[in-house]
Amino acid sequence: MKKLFVIIIAIFIFSSNSSFAQPKITLHLTGGYGSPLGDFKTEVPSTSPVAESNRADADYFPYYTKSLLNFGADGKLAFGKKGNARVVLGFTYNMFSNSTDAVFRINANNDLAVTSFDPKVNIFSVYLGGEWAFRPNEKVNPFIGAGLAGNFFGGKFEFGREVRIKGEQRTGPMDMKSETRIGIIFDGGIDFMLSKSIGAIVGVKYHLINPLGKGADDPSEIGPNEIDLGDQEHTEDGKTFAARSISSINGYAGVSFYFGAPKKTVIRK
């Protein structure tokens, strides 16, 4: 990590006096790695002792994830004489997952056993926002931005053996119930302009995933093989669950493509 920062600083110093014409439109293709945060990151209970108090509760399945992989694309339209301000439209496909062991009920007698458990929650995010570029006419261009995101949930939960969940025997994966939440994405990074048409980008995104649209479905609204998000305060089976705030953070890197850079004016004598 230290070597990466040294390289970035070296590029910044080397390029500080170099400039290109400001591109009107910038497209990015990126990939990233990160982690769920807040209530979205709940530790799976210990497998020792094998006791009811350590059972993996289905109401927490979406929250048992540990790591995040994502990929996405965005387009940025610069406006104004200097091109510092930009409108940003993009999408990100986020894959939250974990691979661990957990305690489950395995039959109608509520006997317990330890088995493998792989929760996977996918969120497709479409966002629209704004950005401020600090050095739009330079090869090294830092930026910050924010936008509103529509977040669409899906996924599945896999088990290493037959288990009993929500009163039924389950022999295959259970599905993440489709959910929609409105969130906020904060973004910051550096765009390295390698030529007039292509460059590289690195950055960090912090995503508040569910500040708007929280909910908790009535059991009658949930399919026989589904697990809902349940992020609003609710009571189920005599147990009260507090409202949950879910978020994530990830670093990313990718390729930049530049379009519409103004041509230099040639003055003829």
Image (spheres, helix red, strand yellow):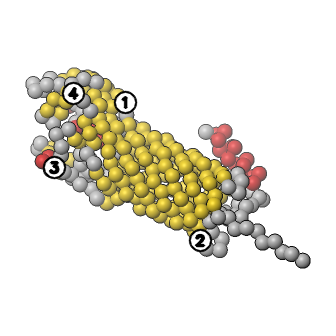
* Left or right: where 191 falls relative to 242: right
Circle 1 SS class: loop
Quarter holding residue 156: top left
**Rendered position, 73 above or below 49:** below
Q: Position of residue 262 (x, y in %)?
A: 69, 68
* Residue sitting farthest toward the bottom: 269
Earlier along the polypeptide chain: callout 4 or callout 2? 2
Q: Name the element at disc 2.
A: strand
Disc 4 residue type (three-letter): Thr
Distance from disc 3 to disc 2, alpha carbons, whole Å, reads 47 Å
Q: Quadrant of residue 4?
A: top right
Tag 4 near tag 2, CB within 8 Å: no
Is 99 displayed left or right of 259 in the figure? Answer: left
Q: Nearer the viewer, residue 66 or 201?
A: 201
Question: Label 1 amino acid?
Answer: Ser
- Mark 3 lies on a secondary structure that is helix
Asked if residue 157 lies left or right of residue 53, the reply is: right
* Residue located beneath label 1 in the image: 99
Tell me which label, 4 or 1, sits earlier in the chain. 1
Which marked residue is nearer to the observer: mark 1 or mark 3? Answer: 3
In front: label 1 or label 2: 2
Around disc 2, counting alpha carbons within 10 Å, would you say few (fewer than 14), some (14 to 19), or many (20 or more)? few
Residue drawn at (39%, 41%) of the image = 96
Cα distance, mark 4 to mark 2?
Answer: 56 Å
- Cα distance, mark 4 to mark 1? 18 Å
Element under label 4?
loop
Return the residue at label 4: 171
As drawn, the label of residue 248 is none
Residue at 55% in and 61% down: 76
Which label number is shown at residue 79?
2
Picture coordinates of residue 80, whole percent (x, y) = 61, 74
Whole-percent x, y for residue 114 in the image: 25, 23
